[in-house]
Amino acid sequence: SIILFHAEGHTTALEAGDIRIASLNLLLQCNTLVWCGSSLNDAKIMFDEASHFMKQHNVLSLLFIAETRELDKLVNGWESVTSTDPYGSSEYYLQGKNPLAAQSSRFQGLMISFIYRNFEVTESAAERYIGCKYDSWIALNYKTIETFILGLVSFWIFRQTNRIQWLETGVRIKQIMEKWSETSRWNFLQKFYLLEAEEHFCNERYESAKLSYDVAIAFAAKHKFIVDEALACELAGYFALRISDHSNSLDYFKMAYEKYRDWGAHGKAATLRP
């Protein structure tokens, strides 16, 4: 698996004396653990170990990525972490001194505000995130998740504001995800169908939207992507609520609640408690 690949990469880099690459492999293991649906508590333990390793070896340029404030919010609730910056980042990283850390920080802020459905913060965070997109081979591991979440965010912002550029961004990302799904159905097919469902929702193609939400949920369950399944169930619930399908909406929210709990995101699950 990809987790074992990065574990071997960490060991090999250590043997070669390359501490920075060893640190990167630790971080990539952490990121994979979070988004493959492993327990968030397990992921936090690994992040803490990565942070300790980087402090011990003075790899300060990557240390910020190992912070776990956003994981703490998923586990314990939106208000569980006190910060003067709602986007979870310090000015040091926002000034361009570490563009990779700045992008990671802004994505974390975007992701957590979207998952907690805080629209004002999400809209602002999306604009900030797009403004600091940074292309690097190091960031490739994060690219798929960041692209997926940005697509979902874009469709939501369009429905709230009718700003056409956000619909266009969402459609473009859906097309990217469709291409990725052609090379790896297991990893990307459920993500593509969820983005397709959100596009149908935006364009008021409600029957097609319902079908795509259900297909996304089914593939996420089949492929064992708990996070994708939780998101698909929750977004399907909001869709059903919008079209006054209250019975199905409740069922979707109940499924989302269970999947967030399975992930360990108890703070988020509490917002959907039946």
Image: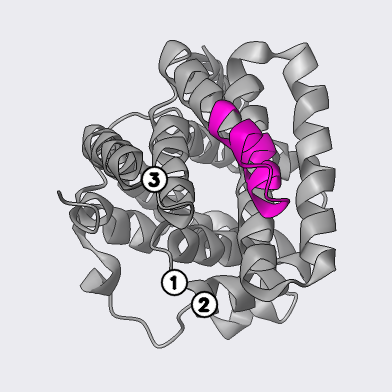
Label placed on residue 44: none
Q: Is residue 104 left or right of residue 177?
A: left
Q: Is residue 196 magenta?
A: yes
N-terminal-most mark, 1 or 3 = 1
N-terminal-most mark, 2 or 3 = 2
Secondary structure under tag 2 reads helix
Task: Give the spatial CA distance, label 1 vs label 2.
Answer: 6 Å
Report the span colored magenta: 194-211
Q: Is residue 92 left or right of residue 87?
A: right
Residue topped by disc 3: 245
How far from the left and from the top, in percent, is residue 132?
76, 68
Residue occupying the point 23% across, 63% down: 77
Q: Indicate whether 247 appears above or below 68.
A: above
How far from the left and from the top, in percent, is residue 6?
54, 23
Near-viewer residue (142 or 222): 222
Farthest residue, direction front:
244
How far from the left and from the top, in percent, is residue 209?
61, 37
Classify 10 Å Cα crowding around label 3: few (below 14), some (14-19), many (20 and above). few
In this rendering, does residue 126 appear at all?
yes
Task: Give the spatial CA distance, label 1 vs label 3.
Answer: 23 Å
Residue topped by disc 1: 118
Residue occupying the point 44% across, 61% down: 112
Secondary structure under tag 1 reads loop
Q: Are marks 1 and 2 in contact (CB under 8 Å)?
A: yes
Q: Indicate whether 68 appears above or below 19.
A: below
How far from the left and from the top, in percent, is residue 60?
54, 61
Camera-nearest label, 1 or 3:
3
Farthest residue, direction left:
274
Camera-nearest label, 2 or 3:
3
